[in-house]
Image (tube, grey):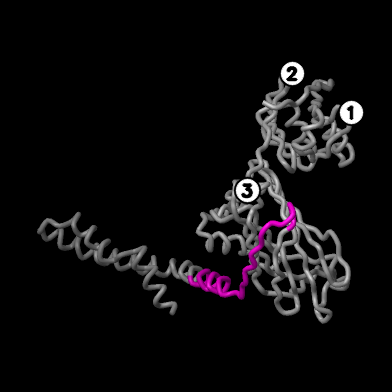
């Protein structure tokens, strides 16, 4: 088997006959000197091909190993469950049951900036489980192979290749130097909402500052179900796998979410020195993007401060209030150069009956302006 791949690799990357003929054509002339040149070129070409083969062998075996790993991944047992919407957020879906574990998508909420997927798991009594550290790997993508997020729960080096395997299966370009380059989610979280009687309700939350694409169907893959325990004696965390199955859930996006329109907002009164480049409110959150070098630098220099001190400064730089002065919860914040991006827990339904204000502190003074629909 290795000889076959070695032959293909060498022939595809280093065609000896082509290289030889190309070099020979440049020295042909018929003279005695050219005959010596031809013989010399033959020797150089042969030595060069040998060197290329020897140097290329590690690459060939890496190529073979990668193909074997991908084949193993594709041959993993997998089963798909299809669900449709009933009663707003709930998903009408049967459990997939495998080796004493039942799982299904329980509910789904999607918008331009957030996706919330709630799972229900049930476990047989003979399955060892630690619900507090229950975890799994997952991949979320749509029917057009737009990858929302890939999360690898394991520290195992082999399983760490999960993102690359998913990319290859979906035929999406993979950048090993930036595995998040083609993923829409800018932040992810996962946790158990409840755990009792060997049943776990678990939720995945994906947020995107750049926005998720409109999709008719969403696919959620979960695998490597397991849990971890702390080994006090050896001072390390041990991982325990409870399922090596590959679960696939296909969910139709409810019309309510697919046809939902966001509101683009603007400042009622401009704030000097602040350029609001994006203010969009959806069914799930408010996303703010603005340009101000002073604020961006303060956020980026936060790592030099004490945690509590920085939290106070950060919370006063930019915050959202309603017409009663109540603050909206900030869910996410990032900054780069002179730009700041933030997501707040307030929806467009709230804006239908209330006013929203952005509050910005700069130059030692707080400025306020109402956010109104464009």
Expressed as whole percent of the image width and height from the top left, the position of residue 346 reads 79, 38
- Residue 73 magenta-drawn? yes
Quadrant that contains the N terminus: bottom left
**Quarter of the image holding residue 6?**
bottom left
Expressed as whole percent of the image width and height from the top left, the position of residue 345 reads 79, 41
Spot the residue most to the bottom: 126
The residue under the point 68% across, 24% down is 275
**Quarter of the image holding residue 209?**
top right
Q: Is residue 295 above or below residue 347?
A: above
Query: Which numbered disc flags the more N-terminal residue, 1 or 2?
Result: 2
- Residue 19 magenta-drawn? no
Q: Is residue 107 visible?
A: yes
**SS for tag 1?**
loop
**SS for tag 2?**
loop
Query: Which numbered disc flags the more N-terminal residue, 3 or 2?
Result: 3
**SS for tag 3?**
loop
The residue under the point 73% across, 69% down is 103
Q: Residues within 10 Å of mark 1 (few under 14, many from 20)?
A: few
Left or right, 27 with reference to 45: left
**Quarter of the image holding residue 49?**
bottom left
Please give the residue where the numbered disc 1 appears in the rendered image.
324
Q: Which residues are magenta?
A: 64-90
Query: Which numbered disc flags the more N-terminal residue, 1 or 3?
Result: 3
Please give the residue where the numbered disc 2 appears in the rendered image.
269
Quadrant that contains the C terminus: top right
Q: CA distance from mark 1 to mark 2?
A: 19 Å
The residue under the point 84% across, 30% down is 322
Expressed as whole percent of the image width and height from the top left, the position of residue 298 reads 77, 31
Q: Is residue 352 above or below residue 203?
A: above
The label nearer to you, 1 versus 3, is: 1
The label nearer to you, 3 versus 2, is: 2
């Amino acid at each position: 088997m290795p000889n076959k791949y070695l032959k293909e690799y060498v022939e595809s990357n280093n065609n000896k006959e082509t290289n030889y003929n190309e070099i020979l054509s440049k020295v042909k002339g018929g003279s005695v000197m050219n005959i010596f040149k031809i013989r010399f070129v033959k020797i150089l070409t042969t030595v060069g091909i040998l060197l290329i083969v020897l140097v290329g062998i590690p690459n060939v075996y890496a190529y073979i190993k990668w193909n074997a790993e991908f084949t193993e991944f594709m041959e993993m047992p997998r089963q798909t469950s299809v669900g449709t919407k009933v009663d707003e957020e709930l998903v009408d879906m049967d459990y997939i049951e495998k080796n004493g574990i039942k799982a299904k998508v329980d509910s789904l909420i999607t918008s331009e900036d957030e996706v919330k997927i709630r799972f229900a798991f049930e476990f047989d009594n003979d399955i060892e489980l630690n619900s507090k550290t229950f975890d799994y790997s997952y991949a979320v993508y749509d029917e057009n192979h737009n990858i929302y997020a890939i999360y690898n729960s394991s520290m195992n080096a082999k399983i760490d290749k999960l993102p690359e395997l998913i990319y290859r299966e979906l035929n999406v370009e993979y950048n090993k130097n930036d595995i998040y380059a083609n993923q829409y989610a800018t932040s992810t979280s996962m946790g158990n909402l409840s755990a009792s009687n060997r049943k776990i309700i678990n939720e995945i939350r994906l947020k995107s500052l750049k926005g998720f694409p409109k999709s008719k169907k969403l696919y959620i893959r979960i695998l490597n179900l397991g849990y971890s325990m702390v080994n006090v004696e050896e001072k390390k965390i041990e991982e325990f796998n409870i399922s090596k199955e590959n679960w696939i859930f296909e969910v139709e996006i409810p019309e309510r979410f697919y046809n939902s329109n966001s509101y683009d907002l603007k400042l009622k009164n401009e704030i000097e020195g602040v350029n609001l480049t994006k203010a969009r409110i959806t069914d799930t959150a408010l996303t703010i993007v603005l340009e101000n070098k002073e604020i961006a630098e303060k956020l980026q220099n936060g790592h030099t401060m004490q945690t509590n001190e920085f939290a106070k400064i950060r919370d006063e730089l930019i915050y959202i209030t309603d017409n009663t002065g109540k603050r909206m919860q900030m869910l996410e914040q990032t900054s780069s150069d002179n730009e700041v991006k933030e997501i707040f827990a307030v929806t467009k339904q709230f804006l239908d009956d209330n006013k929203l204000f952005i509050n910005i502190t700069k130059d030692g003074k707080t400025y306020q302006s109402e956010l109104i629909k464009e």
